[in-house]
Amino acid sequence: MITVGFFGELILAIVCLLVGAVIGFFLARHYLQKYMQKNPPINEQMIRAMLSSMGRTPSQKQVNQTMKAMTKYM
């Protein structure tokens, strides 16, 4: 039987953590891409609808300003 010392166990634990982090990264990336396809970020049509629902007729300048402000904080 092979005995693995303290350093062997330490290296094994570090390798397992690294493998888990890599797998977690790719799973999270896949989930985020799927979520973004299903729920796309806000676009100009959504901003126009939001401003129109508040009783305003939005100009292109207002839409651009709102879009710029939204993308700044996303």
Image: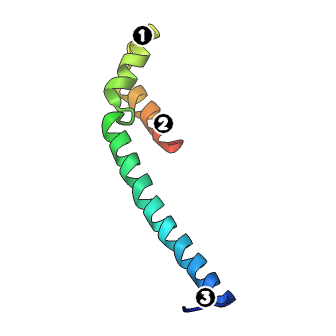
Residue 61 pos. (x, y %): 39, 29
The answer to whether residue 70 is left or right of residue 4 is left
Camera sees residue 8: yes
Identify the mark nearer the N-term, 2 or 3.
3
Camera sees residue 59: no
- How busy is the neighbourhood of tag 1: few (under 14 within 10 Å), some, or many (20 plus)? few
Q: Residue at 39% of width from left, 47% of height from top?
A: 31
Q: Say which quarter of the image contains residue 59.
A: top left
Cβ atoms under marks 1 and 3 closer than 8 Å? no
Q: Mark 1 highlights which residue?
A: 53
Q: Is residue 69 above or below residue 3?
A: above
Identify the mark nearer the N-term, 1 or 3.
3
Residue 25 pos. (x, y %): 45, 60
User: How far is mark 1 from mark 3, CA to CA?
Assistant: 65 Å
Foreground mark, 1 or 3? 3
Residue 72 pos. (x, y %): 51, 44
Q: Disc 3 marks which amino acid? A: Gly
Q: Is residue 46 above or below residue 43?
A: above
Q: Say which quarter of the image contains residue 12.
A: bottom right
Q: Mark 3 highlights which residue?
A: 8
Render colour scheme: rainbow
Tell me the SS state at disc 2.
helix
Q: What mark, if any, has residue 70 been given in the picture?
A: 2
User: How far is mark 2 from mark 3, CA to CA?
Assistant: 51 Å
Q: Disc 1 marks which amino acid? A: Ser
Foreground mark, 2 or 3? 3
The quarter of the image holding the N terminus is: bottom right
Identify the mark nearer the N-term, 1 or 2.
1
User: How far is mark 1 from mark 2, CA to CA?
Assistant: 18 Å
Q: Return the residue nearer the eye: 73 or 30.
A: 30
Q: Return the residue nearer the eye: 5 or 26.
A: 5
Tell me the SS state at disc 3.
helix
